[in-house]
Amino acid sequence: MSKIFWTGVFFLMSTLFALSKENPTDVITVVTNHLNMVFTVSDKGKVIYHYFGRKLDDYSGFTGRHYANRPDTPDEFASEIYPAYGGRYYTEPALQITHADGLLTTDLVYSKHSSKNIDSNVTETVIELKDKLYPVIINIHLKAYKKENVICQFVSVINDGKKDIQLGRFYSAYLPLQKRSYYLTHFHGTWATEMQMAEEQLLPGIKKIESKKGVKTTQSENPSFLLSVNSPATEDAGEVYAGSLAWSGNYALSFELDEAGILNVLGGMNPFLSEYSLAPNQVFSTPEMVLTYSDSGKGQISRNYHDWARKYAMAHGDRLHPIVLNSWEGAYFSFDENTITGMVDKAAEFGIEMFVLDDGWFGNKHPRNGDNAGLGDWQTNKEKLPRGINYLAEYTHSKGMRFGIWIEPEMVNPKSELAEKHPEWIVKSGKREILTMRNQWLLDLSNPQVQDFIVKTFDDVVALSPYISYIKWDANRHVDNIGSEYLPAGKQTHFWIDYTKGLYSVYERIRAKHPDIMIQLCSSGGGRLDFGALKFHDEYWASDNTSPLDRIFIQYGSNLFFPAIATASHVSTAPNHQTGAITPLKFRFDVAMSGRLGMEMQPKDIKGDEIDFTKEAIKNYKLIRPIVQLGDLYRLVSPYEGSGWASHMYVAKDKKEAVLFAYSLKYHNRTMSFNIKMSGLDPHKKYKIRELNRKYDSVLDNNDTFTGDFLMTAGLNLNVKSLNESAVILLTEI
Ligand code: GLA
C-alpha cells in the first residue's frame, strides 16, 4: 500500500469526522471574523441556544455545567435553537406541525450536525433535528459570512413519513436574548412615506411587525429591525442586534418579552391563513433571516449589511451604476416619439447615461393612456410609437446612452386583452367581486402557466430592441380576497407562499437568461424592499415621493439596511408633484447625489443658468460616484434628532477619499453655522477639501487641508443654516 493511499484514507476519515460529529455533548459554534453563535446539546438531546454576539475567545463556559437562561431545571426550560410547539412550551413557537394522525405537538432533539466551507469567506453549518416519535426532519441552516459579519439562517422541514403532514408555523429564525432592557427600531410608512423610523422600548408582552398584503408587503412596515440592548445605541456606541427577512410575501417579526425577562425574537413567513401541507419526502424551506450584530453602535450594522448586500444580495453590486433619466414625472402617460426623443436629447446634453421609458408605451385594443387600461398587453402602442421601441432605443444609443423600459408583469387591467383571454389567471375568491386597486387585478403566480407568461413577457420586451439594457419592474397593488383557480380546494392556504415562491422562480429563470440586464425593483415606490427580491435586482425605487425634504428621511431609513448603490434617487421638478414642496435645484441634486443619482422630470424645464448647474452636478456625481456607491456609510447627524440638520458621509475603502453631505431642514438663527464632526477617516491622513455644486457663500476655502483627526474631533463649521440649504464636500488625501 502506498503512502499516498494511507494519507488519502486518513484525510477522508478526518474530513468525515469533521463533517458529522455525532457526540451530543458537543458545542456547536457558527463563527465570522467578529461574531459567533454558540449552541450546546443537553443531556436530553435538546439543542440549547446560548449566545449570539461579539466573538468569544473561549466558549467552554457553556459546557460542563448547566449554563442556561432559565434557571429552574435548565435542561427542560432553557431556550432551544428552534422551539417547536410541544413539551415545556412558554412563548410563541417557531414551528408547529400537525402530524398525519392529527397530533398537534412536536418534540425536536439533536440528530447530527455538519459544517462545510462554501468558499474562503462563507461557511454553512447544518444542524439536523428530529422529532422523538414522528417522522419529521428539521435542518437549521446557518450561513456565516466571515468578512461581512453576517449570519443567514433558514430552516428546511422534511416529511420523512408516508402521509401528509400540516405545517401551521414555520419561522426562519429564533433568537433569545437575556438583557436588562430592549429598544426596538422598526420602519413603517405608506405610499410616498416609506421607511419611517420609530424606536421604542419593549415592555412585557408581544410586539409584532407583520404584513398580510401578499404583494407590496413593505408599504406599511419593513421586515428589517434593529434591537439595541441595555440602553439605546448611538451610531458608534452600544450593543445592537439586527435582522432583515429576505422574503417578499407575508412576513411576521415577533418580539415577546416574557416573565423571565428574556426577549424571544422570531422572524419568518407569516402563518396567517397559510397552513401548508407537506407530502411524503417533500421539503419545505423558509426564507433567510439575515442577522448581524455590533457592539459599537448602529453605524457598523449598516456597513455590515451594505458590504454583504453588494456582494451577495443584489445584482452587479461591484460595478458603478449609471445615471438615469426616467420619463415618469416628466411625461406620465402623455407622450409620443417626439416627446421621448426630446427628453433623450436633453439628457445626453446633461451627461446622463441611461434613459428609461416608464409606463404608457403599450396596449393597442386598450391603449395604456391612463392607469385604467392595457396592463397585460405588452405590445408597443402603434399610435404613440409608430416606429416601435427599437427606434427609440437605437436613437438613445446613438446619443451615447443606454435604454431601459418599464413593465408591471404580475398585473392586469380588467380592460385588457389578457383579462379577456385568461380570466382563470386572475386572483379571485370564488364568485365574489374581484376588487380592483389602481384599476387593476393580480395574476395568480402560484399557477405555472402564469409564471411562464411572465418569463415570456420579460423575454419579449427585452427582445423589442438589442439596445434595451434595463428593466423597471413594478407591482402596484396588494392582495385582497385571496383565491386561486389553479390551487385545489384543500390547498387554498398555500396561495401566499406559492405566489412568492412562484415569483422567485420567475426571477431565477429571468436572471439565468439575462444575467447582464439591470433590473429596478419597484412596487408603487418602496413597496417591495427586502433582501429576498433585491437579490435579483440592481436597485430599488425607494419611493414615489421625490421631494428632497422627505427623501432625506426615506433614504435614512432605507440606507440603514440597503446600500446607496441600490438606492435610486431622482431629481424632480419644483413644486414637487407629490408634496408641493418648492426646493432649490441644488438641494434636490445634493440629496439625490447621496444615492444612485437620476432625474425624473421633463429636462427641458431646466432653463437659464440651471442648465450649467445641472451639467456641473452630474459631472460632480461622476467624480464622487465610486465613493458613494462602493464606500462605507457614516451617519453623522440624524434628521430625526430634531436639530433641523442632517448629515452623513461616505468614505472610500482605502480612506483616501470621502464625501460629506449636509442639509438644513429649517431656518436656523442667522448667526449659526452647522458644526459637523466627521467619522470613518484616517486620523493620520491629511485631506484637501473641495465643495461641489457650490452656490452660496461658504466659510470654507476650497483646497484647505485638515488632518483626519481634526475633522473627526473639531469638525468643520458649514454655512448651511436656512431651510433647504445644503453642501456636498469632497475630501481627498494629499
Ligand atoms: C408606480 C411607480 C412609479 C411609476 C408608476 C407608473 O407608481 O412607483 O414610479 O412607474 O407606477 O404607473
Image (spheres, rainbow, N blue to C red):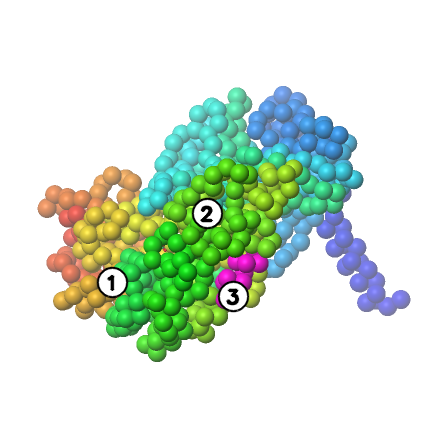
Q: Are marks 3 and 1 in contact (CB under 8 Å)?
A: no
Residue mark closest to the camera, 3 vs 2: 2
Secondary structure of residue under mark 1 = loop
Q: Is residue 453 magenta?
A: yes
Q: Quarter of the image for the C terminus: give it.
A: bottom left
Q: Is residue 221 magenta?
A: no
- State the mark number for residue 459: 3
Q: Would residue 148 be visible to someone looking at this image? A: no
Q: In which quarter of the view is residue 667 placed?
A: top left
Q: CA distance from mark 3 to mark 1?
A: 29 Å
User: Does label 2 or label 1 sit earlier along the sequence?
Assistant: 2
Please tell me how crowded label 2 is: few (under 14), some (14-19), or many (20+) other residues with Cα within 10 Å: many
Q: Would residue 609 be visible to someone looking at this image? A: yes
Residue mark closest to the camera, 2 vs 1: 2
Identify the residue shown where x is 28% and y is 44%: 639
Q: Report the span colored magenta.
A: 451-460
Question: Mark 2 is on which residue type?
Answer: Trp
Q: In this view, which residue lies farthest toward the right? A: 1
Identify the residue shown where x is 70% and y is 48%: 114
Question: Mark 1 is on which residue type?
Answer: Gln
Q: CA distance from mark 2 to mark 1?
A: 30 Å
For residue 284, side relative to residue 408 (left or right): right
For residue 635, side relative to residue 445 (left or right): left
- State the mark number for residue 602: 1
Q: Quarter of the image for the N terminus: give it.
A: bottom right
Of residues 618 and 11, the one nearer the viewer is 618
- State the mark number for residue 58: none
Q: Are marks 2 and 1 in contact (CB under 8 Å)?
A: no
Q: Which residue is mark 2?
A: 441
Q: Position of residue 320 (x, y in %)?
A: 40, 66
